[in-house]
Image (cartoon, coloured by chain):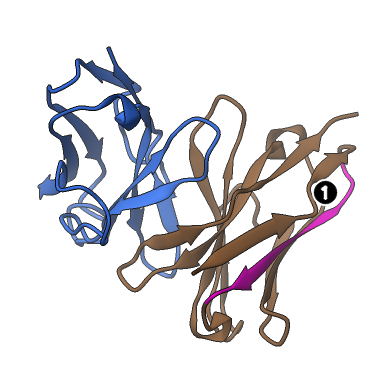
Amino acid sequence: QVQLVESGGGVVQPGRSLRLSCAASGFTFSRYGMHWVRRAPGKGLEWVSFIRNGGTNQNYADSVKGRFTISRDNSRNTLYLQMDSLRAEDTAVYYCARDGPHFDMDSWGQGTLVTVSS
Amino acid sequence: QSALTQPPSVSGSPGQSVIISCTGTSSDIGSYDRVSWYQQPPGTAPKLLIYEVTNRPSGVPDRFSGSKSGNTASLSITGLQAEDEADYYCSSKLSSDTWVFGGGTKLTVL
């Protein structure tokens, strides 16, 4: 079955960097686009970024554009999110999700918590 | 990338029905059938409930249904059960491989 496992979260000071990983299994990773979605405390889901299956095209929410970079290693079945110049408002649980065939996100990981605080 | 508009909360008693609305614009919901709905019970990951406005993935009970009229999509839940208590989110794919979520609706089963 599809499994997505995020890692790399933690506490980081404002202005610093962090890299999240999402290990995929149970499906042919290289055939699917992938998303990062976050949920800040007390708030709703926010789409963060998307990368196509081949890694040639990436898109970002305006709130993270220029600070976050999505990438993938299809040989390792792993998705990444490099987060630079972190701000307090980036504090959230970050989920990776598989891009489904119907403009949806059909499988989700359990999430990893990122806390940006001094 | 403005968020879609959902009511913050809805409630109903077991066995009753509720409807959650999701309002966008003529550029997103009004123009394309790219609306999906997600359920997120407390402390768990989101789960896909509805895709392309009206379709249920296998395993989702037929108590859950979706529809759309103009710029507004709706999620209907009939025969409410205690386990339905969760946050519900609509989402729409925009152009150029970007997506937007609604603000979320907390469903309370009384």
> Which residue is identified by label 1?
A85
User: In the rendered image, what is the letter of the chain coloured brown?
Assistant: A
Query: Looking at the picture, does residue A80 appear above or below residue B79?
Result: below
Query: Looking at the picture, which amino acid does disc 1 mark?
Result: Ser
Colour assignment, chain B: blue
Question: Where residue B16 sits in the image (x, y, percent)?
Answer: 12, 22
- State the predominant SS element of the stretch in magenta: strand
Q: Name the side, left or right, on which A94 lies relative to A20.
A: left
> In terms of image quadrants, where is residue A20?
bottom right
Query: Looking at the picture, does residue A28 appear above or below residue A118?
Result: below
Image point (56%, 85%), residue name: A30
Looking at the rendered structure, the secondary structure element under dot 1 is loop
> In terms of image quadrants, where is residue A88?
top right
Which chain is disc 1 placed on?
A
Q: Name the side, left or right, on which B110 lies relative to A41.
A: left
Q: Residue furthest left?
A: B69
Q: Residue furthest top?
A: B110
Image point (13%, 30%), residue name: B79
Q: Name the side, left or right, on which B75 lies relative to A97.
A: left
Image point (26%, 43%), residue name: B24
Question: Where residue B85 sits in the image (x, y, percent)?
Answer: 35, 26
Q: Which residues are magenta?
A: A15-26
Q: Quadrant of the C terminus of chain A?
A: top right
